[in-house]
Image (tube, coloured by chain):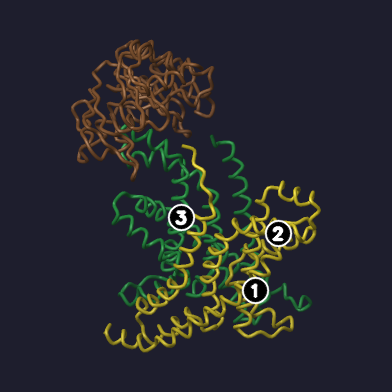
Chain colours: A brown, B yellow, C green
Amino acid sequence: MIRFSKINKWFGDLHVLKDINLNVEAGEVVVVCGPSGSGKSTLIRCINRLEPIQQGELVVDNMKVHDKKTNMTRIRAEIGFVFQQFNLYPHMTALGNVTIAPVKVRKMKKNEAEKLGREILERVGLGAKADNYPAQLSGGQQQRVAIARGLCMRPKIMLFDEPTSALDPEMINEVLDVMRDLAKEGMTMMVVTHEMGFAREVANRVVFMDEGQIIEVAPPNDFFKNPRTERAKLFLSKILTH
Amino acid sequence: MWGFYFEQLVQSIPFFLKGLWMTVAVSGLSLVAGTVLGFVWGVIRAGRGKVLKRIIGAWVDLIRGTPFLVQVFIFFFILPEAGIQLEAFPASVIALTNLSACFICEIVAGGIQSIPSGQREAATASGLSSYHQLRYIILPQAMRTILPPLVGQYVLLIKDSSVVSAIGVTDVTRVGWLTVQRIPEGIMVFGLVGILYFLICYPLIQLSNSLEKRMTVVTTKL
Amino acid sequence: MLETFNFRVIVEYLPFYWKCFLATLWLSGGSLLGALVVGVIACAMRLSESRIISRVAGVYIESIRSTPLLAQLYFFYFGLPSLGIRMPEEATGILALTLNSGAYMAEIIRAGVQSIAYGQIEAAMSSGLSYLQRMRYIVLPQALGVSIPPMLGQAIVLVKDSALLSLISIVELTRAGQILTSDRFMPAEGFLTTAVFYLIIYYILKAFSHWSQKRLIFRGA
């Protein structure tokens, strides 16, 4: 579903992604973790070309993202992206936020989209808040609306860039619960996160990155119990003693 | 036809340069006087003297609420009735100085008020007098906030100086107006006028922009 | 001077002043609407990804900002006839005012657009919305909300700028003062009355600006 081949990316002179090779299959849940600056956010932002890549091939759902001529609209319609800072549109209600793309990009009729929107908001537990504005919602609620916004496009892939890092601790679980359900339903997901409990429960594989390179890829049990590389061991020791 | 007029225009260039000099003279004098006056008023406006603050505030409001052209007419036509005979050039400089002072006053007051009050408290606690506070603590810091909009204001005032052509001051605009009576190619004549103003104003605008960038210490959260 | 201030003349000319007041209002108002349209278009061009389109808009905006309105006004007043275009002075006046304020409006809107957190644009991009769709549904509605106070400021400037139209023989408030000066040799009565009318417009616009800022504070997220 997602294939990275020999990907290299620079920010000016800074080499942020070094020779990345990774395949993600349909229905897989992949968690990406690593220290700050390891390039993990950059990695998933390349998938829907929020960040362009300079070298290598990136194929998503059989479409070539690395090719500048590719029209990204079709690809982006199939990918839901959830940001660390939620990025909800403050001048629209929750319902407005989740329906604008289905109406404008998938050309759905407005009442169909609203019906779908309310269903999906219900699914993330916010059916009653459909007509509220983001400013009236808590952080956890806003992030769930953001997830609903992604889901309303009926995407094949959901990408999450540190979805709980900006949340107060008591709200992290409500968001993780939604993500867990999504994973169980078979959604292809790539999640950048520090939430190791989530990774252990739900991930098919864990990708560990450091300094722009993929250091280790392994199923969660193997990764957390028997990390093979020194850097992975170091990282885990720092994270797991919380 | 065009070629003929173009030649005549080229021959008029010395006239235009004299007009340019007049623009520079009127603007220059007014900006210098206006800056001095504007700083004085600005400090008062940011200070504690309630009565003076209000008076200056009311005057600034009057000036900001009426067109400069009307102010020029008032200074030129009405002051003589009060006994002060003025020629066009002095009247223009007085009007433009007044305009400058009013706008600069607001910029200065804003800059001073943007300094956290803690600075003043610390200075007072160490025993510095108001004058010393202003001179060594407040104004130096306020200048960072004041300088970019100040330069921007200078550009606006140089453009406003074109209005004094209406009472006969032979600045660049008036030279254009006089020339177009002889050379009826408005586009060429006022194109030249525009270029001359552009040569003065555009560099100043760029200066203001670059000052603004340098004065703003950007702290982006990543 | 006050002893000789002739109020009777003012009263006599009051109907004329009223007409001129209305003229100023509709000249400024019309130009304001035009400037909004021009401003939105110029801003969209300026922010376009095409370098040519962006440069064209840039040249327009910088030319306006680096030259005085009076020179621009004379440019059109004297220049258009030499191209064979004859327009009534009012049209020329509104054209000059519209193009002038349009450039400033473009910059105001641009500041509003750029004040929007980039994350939202990324979110919109990620859902597949096109550039135009992002502008129309996400960026512009918020940018315009933020832009209202500076736009009102520009409206005030526009009303004052309209005074220059008196110099191309358009009958409005400042011309009323000029007429009172040339017809009756009463510049004081003439221009002070003119000033009072302008101040009325100014204070009304200022009050409106305060009121709308209070409302906006409640709406903001």
Residue highlighted by disc 2: B136
**Crowd class of label 2 (few under 14; some 14 to 19; many from 20; radius 10 Å):** few
Dot 2 amino acid type? Tyr
Residue drawn 75% across and 48% down? B122
Residue drawn 33% across and 26% down? A80
Residue C201 appears in view: no
Residue highlighted by disc 1: B33
Residue B133 is labelled as none
Which is nearer the eye, C194 or A234? A234
Camera-near label (1 vs 2) is: 2
Chain of the residue under label 3 = C
| Element on which disc 3 rests | helix
Give a yes or no on whether discs 1 and 2 share a subunit.
yes
**Crowd class of label 1 (few under 14; some 14 to 19; many from 20; radius 10 Å):** some
Which is nearer the eye, C163 or A192? A192
| Element on which disc 2 rests | helix
Dot 3 amino acid type? Met
- Percent of width and height locating residue C165: 50, 70
Residue highlighted by disc 3: C105
C146 relative to A50 in the view: left or right: right
Give a yes or no on whether discs 1 and 3 share a subunit.
no
Dot 1 amino acid type? Ala
| Labels 1 and 2: the sequence-earlier one | 1
C133 relative to C111 in the view: left or right: left
**Crowd class of label 3 (few under 14; some 14 to 19; many from 20; radius 10 Å):** many
Chain of the residue under label 2 = B
Residue C21 appears in view: yes
Camera-near label (3 vs 2) is: 2
Distance of label 3 from label 2 (alpha carbons): 39 Å
A203 relative to A87 in the view: left or right: left
